[in-house]
Amino acid sequence: MIEKIDRKKQKVASRIEEIVKAEFGIRFWQLKPEDELRCLRLAQWEEKYRVSLRFILKEIVPIWKQKFARYSAGAFGVKIPTLVGSKSEEILRQKIVELFPNGENIQQWKATAQQRQWFQYREGIRLQENWEYPSQAVENYQHKMERERELRKEFEKKARLRPYRNNPWVS
């Protein structure tokens, strides 16, 4: 169990490191072990609110940076405990409601997850069309698309029956 948590910590920390380096121009970024554990909270918010880690950091960090402008706290102006605190979560919720009033973030997450699962299921099955005979190629393409629609409907029915947390096929 501890190994799983360590792997998850490392994964989240490396994702945060990439984002911080790209978005905030920090060259050197090293988290303390307890801060790595705290950053798991950001991954929880990502799953809970269906927004990316990049979005979370880009929305919360500037607010805290502005608030604590005269103190250079942490590597990019915000300490990790402040970044993952309950007030930050409240700010994030407000930003999500403000930017996605109709739940577009959830709709986008569902569509992306469904598409990813469908492509994993259909990987390697597609064939190339032979365009030497265009009318025949168009006809074959139409038949393939009809068949793919049928397969997707069957796949969707099966996927809806799978009981697991965050199933994008279930409303």
Image: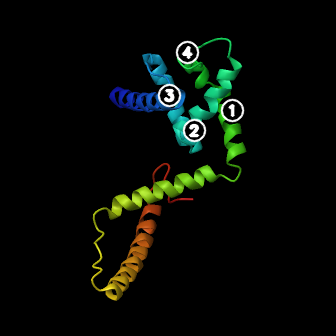
Q: Identify the image quadrant of residue 124.
A: bottom left
Between 140 and 46, the residue placed more toward the observer is 140
Marks 3 and 1, Cα distance to the nearest angstrom? 22 Å
Residue at x-position 59% and y-position 42%: 49
As helix, strand or loop, the secondary structure at mark 3 comes to helix
- Circle 3 residue: 20
Residue at x-position 48% and y-position 19%: 35
Mark 2 belongs to which amino acid? Phe
Frontmost of labels 1 and 4 is: 4
Marks 1 and 4, Cα distance to the nearest angstrom? 21 Å
Frontmost of labels 2 and 1 is: 2
Marks 3 and 4, Cα distance to the nearest angstrom? 12 Å
Q: Residue 48: x, y in percent? A: 57, 41
- Circle 2 residue: 55
Marks 2 and 1, Cα distance to the nearest angstrom? 15 Å
Q: Residue 168: x, y in percent? A: 50, 55
Mark 3 or 4, nearer chain start: 3
Mark 2 or 4, nearer chain start: 2
- Circle 4 residue: 74
